[in-house]
Structure formats: C-alpha cells, structure tokens
Image (cartoon, helix red, strand yellow):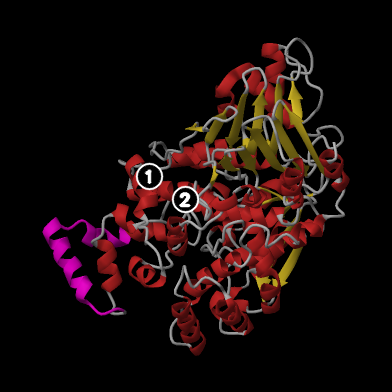
Amino acid sequence: MCGLLVFLSADGTADRPALAAALERLRHRGPDETSMVAEDGVVFGFARLAIVDRAHSHQPGHYPVEGPQQGRWTVVFNGELYNYRQLRADLAREHGAVFATEGEAEVLAAALHHWGPSAVRRLRGMFAAVLWDAAEGTLHAIRDPFGIKPLYHLRTPEGLYLASEKKALLPFAGGAARIGSAALSHYLTLQYVPEPATLHPAIHRLPAGHTLTAGPGQEPVIRRYFEPTLRPVHRPAAEAIAAIRDALRDSVHAHLQSEVPLGAFLSSGVDSTAVLALAKERHPGIRAYTAGFDDPRYSEIEHAAETAAALGVELVATIVRDEDVIEALPRIVWHLDDPVADPAIVPLYFLCRTAARDVTVVLSGEGADELFAGYEIYREPAALARVAGLPDPLRRGLRAVAEVLPEGVRGKSFLQRATTPMDERYYGNARIFGPEEKARLLHGPVSPHTDVTAALFQAAEGLDDVSMMQYIDIHTWLPGDILTKADRMSMAHSLELRVPFLDRAVYAAAAGLPPELKLSPRATKYALREAVRGLVPDAVVDRRKLGFPTPTRVWLRGIVGEWAADVLASAAVGHLIDIDHVQRLLAAHRRGSGDHSRKVWTVLMFCLWYGQQPAGRDAAQPSLWRDAPGAGTLAAWTSG
C-alpha cells in the first residue's frame, strides 16, 4: 500500500522541489518509507506502507533484473495482488522469469513484460499502478476493476502527472484549478462527484477497470479492460448459493495475506459479520472494531457486541460524540480531495483511527450491497409495477394528476416515480437537491443527472430493473461514494482497508443471479444471506440493513448545528451557491420545521472543502507528517 506520484515530462525536465513537496502531501498513505527517483524523463515518487516483503520490496521496482533488457520496466504500485504468488510461479514456469524481491510490484512489471496488455485481466486484487516501458518510451497506468484504489491524472504543457490523491496534483494545475459547474451540480444531487470528473475540471480520475497509456508530450489514451455485467444465469438455487459461499470463503482467506497485524470492521449487518466469521477460520485471534453514537437510536454497538460474542471475537468499540464531529470534520474533508456528503464518513473516520492503533490492515464489507442487491431502493420496481405497467395514455394522465397535487400530499411522490421511466427516475441511492431546487440554489448552470447515467442505461439495455439499478450503482455510487470514503478514511490513518466482496471470484458468483435470488418478500441480498446462514448467527442473517446509521438530523439541531451555522455564514461561496437559502433551511431544521439535514450537510461539506481552496491554503497539513520515518529521503533527492 502506498501513495504514488508520477510525472512524465514533455521535455525531459522536472521541478524537483515542487514534486517532492507534492509527495509530502501523500505521506499519510505511506509513512514507512518515502523515495523519489528520475529515469528517462519520468519521475517516480513513492510513500510506502509496508505490508508484504517489508524488508526488501522497495519502490520504484524494476524488471527484468538481468539480461539484455535489464531494468526495461519501472513500476510504482499501490494496493494488493492477492494472486501474485500464483502469477509469479506462472511467469517463472512459462517464461523463466527471475525475481529480486518477494513483492508484488516486480511481479506486475514482469506480467506486463511477458504477457502484454492482457496481463491486467489476470490480476486479482485492488490496485492503482504506473509503469514506464523504457524500450517503447511509453507510460502505462492501470486501476482495479471496481475502483477500490484511486488514481488521478493531470496533463499540462510541462507533462503528465499522476497521483493517488488529487491534493498532490493541485499545485501543478495553475490557472486550471477552478471549480467546474457541472461537477458541482452533480455533487449537489448525488452527494459525490461522479467519475471521471473532479471539482477541478483539469484533473480527472482514471475510471475503474481502465488503463491509460501515453508518451512524452502525448495526449493520454484511456481504454476499458473490465466491464461488469449482470446477466442472469438460471441454475438451481442451491448451486448458486453454494457458489457464493465458496467464492466468498476463498476471497476472505486470500485477503488475509499480511506480515503485519490484521483486524476486521463489524457493524450489525450480514456483510461484515460474514467477512469476520470467515476470517476467523484462518485467524482465530482476529479482533473486530465497531463504532456508534451517544444516541442509542443510531448506535449499532449493542448488536455488534452480541455478534462478536456469538463468534468468540474480541470487539473494540468507538463512540463518536458531537464535539468529535466538529473537531474532525475539516480534517476529514481535507483527506477527501472532493467533498463526499455521506454522513457515514464520520463514524468511519473514527473507526479507522481506533483500528489503526492496533493493526495495519482491516477487512470490511463494502461492495456486497451493489453485487447482491442489498439496498431497499431495489424494491422500488416491484412497488411501482402496477402503475408503471399501465398503457402509456393512462400513465400520462396519472403523471398530470401528480404534477398538480400540492407538495406533501400522500401519493404524489409515488405517482411521479411510477410514471417516470427508469432511465429518468433512477440515479443512485442519494437524492439530495432536485432540479428545481438546484435552479434556485446555484448561480450557474444546472446539469441534469442524466448526463451521468444516460450512457450507462444504454449499456445496461435488456437487463431486468433490479440488475439495471445495480449496474448504475456499480459504476457511480460504488466508486464515487462507498470506495472513496473507505480509501480516504483508512489512509488518513495509514490503515489498509481490504474489501473481499469486490473480488473477481465473488463478482462472478453474483453476476449471474436471477432477480428471485436477489430480493425475497422479507429481505434484500437473499442469496448472500442464505449462503452465509450457518456461518453467522441467524439473528444477523435475518436483520435488515443498517450500515452505521448517523444522527445527522440530531447533530444539526444541537451544537453541530450551531457550528454549521457559523461555517455557512463565513463561507465565501456566494458566487456559486445561494447560501442564504441554505441558512434558511438550517434555521427551519433547528426549529423543527421539517428535516433538511441531508441538504444542509451536503452544502456544509462543500463549504468546508471550498474553505481549503485554492491549492496551498492547506499547506500546513503535510507538516503533521514531517517527523515520519523516511522524511529525509526527499530532502536528499531535491538537493541531488
């Protein structure tokens, strides 16, 4: 695990001090070792969190280690390859590959060298990597199939920059570091900025399951190598359920490879419990971590404690208080790069902080809801079916009736949704500001959500409604919200978070499930629940999803609300957003005149983020890591 920074110079020159300073902004991703080297007009920066082959697998890595092409490939690699030992054996057997280390980066370079571009389809894990082929004068970048690990890129006249986090690229964006109106508009609806965009239009994310290639001074070429499909394969239910159980067990066991202490997160739900139970098969002494709140209505600690006791696992609980939110939220936003207005990010931050005191690696349950249909909103097509299936004239008439009904009248929302086509109605789990309210809120153009989803719906044509919704979420919500907050909050504490559900074998077991094995009359994720029944307590298997619920509504009516009012009042975002409108929403919420918590929270997160712009405003943050091991390496490099 690491933070990486790569610069491909257009003319062979590089600003060494500026690049070293940029790498310092990634020190939290890899506090164990920091290095930077220049080769053939390419600069490789690396901040390492040592997990495997800790003594020898320093980066950048090189391949081959001998022969006429010695050192042809240079690589920096962030993540884990859970099948790297098998790849290593295959490369040695098929091509006589010889290795100098026991680590993954060298194996990845050897795979590209011997197998070519098709090698990326053999990789099992989470990764973002950049490789330089000196023989061809070509830079290659790859990102894992689901976007677990991030990779940003920026092209300027000076050259091409790539980094694990956007904050390392902002100093090189110059005048291009402005705020994009389309990205802001999408954020206010979705609560995150959808890939590949960022709030800075010049900086992009390499999408999940894509590669990037470029030569010096060339425009990057981006290609997809993985496309998730959810085409039902009808086979006996018992066979499908057994395949899920076998694939998940294999994935969890593969995710346990580590030379450092390892733990697991535990909520009240089936996903994290299944991962913990299967991990305990190989690591009987594994410790679990959970988080909750003072308000028992929002705390899962009691449920998690019951589960941990049933599994015979020690549980460490963290309680998040209102004052903790005020203290940590600016720092949380700094780590995010772009705001993510999912309130669950707060308990996740403190959960990671607690776990990082004991362990370096944790397993978590992200991805299960998208692959196995775990969100309650996936029930919507069945609920709307009676109206949605009516002839077009009748549906148009009901739509007209819905439009004239006053806001808040029972049945208005149902009729609106039931008479709206899926490709216009669905855009994910979060629905914050609608088009009409955004038109009042924004002082710029309003971009419709269909700009993000239209191409995805077209690609998903022919799927059943539930699979179509999953497909949209896998491409948007999963990388934009779920995996972004998981990566940033864990890396904020130099903690490696692993997600066994987002494994190619588990995905293969989930991809062919028919609708009847996804949702039952009583539960979501039906097939997954049945697959782990007997491995985890029945009470957990049958419990509805909670997923670290957060008391945002309560927070904003207490001292967090007072603090939020001060933040909104001092925010210099009036040229972008009608902040008076948001202040009125907060005031109404604090009076009890409606629940506006999600809307206020979304704007609050943006205001905190904007307060840390432009690049350089947060320059004090990297000094927090000034005394970390390896800090002197960069000083030596810049003076060379």
Residue name at image x 68 percent, y 18 percent: 91
Q: Which residue occupies the foreground of this view, 495 or 390? A: 495
User: Which of pointers 2 and 1 lies earlier in the amino acid sequence?
Assistant: 1
Mark 2 vs mark 1, CA separation in Å: 9 Å
The residue that disc 1 covers is 456
Tag 2: Cα neighbours inside 10 Å, few (<14), some, or many (≥20)? Answer: many
Residue name at image x 52 percent, y 60 percent: 542
Residue name at image x 58 percent, y 20 percent: 116
Q: Is residue 348 visible?
A: no
Q: Which residue occupies the foreground of this view, 365 or 134? A: 134
Compared to residue 552, the image places residue 308 above or below, namely above
Dominant secondary structure of the residues highlighted in magenta in the image: helix
The residue that disc 2 covers is 476
Disc 2 residue type? Thr
- Give the x, y percent position of residue 620: 76, 62
Q: Which residue occupies the foreground of this view, 572 or 365? A: 572
**CB atoms of marks 2 and 1 within 8 Å:** yes
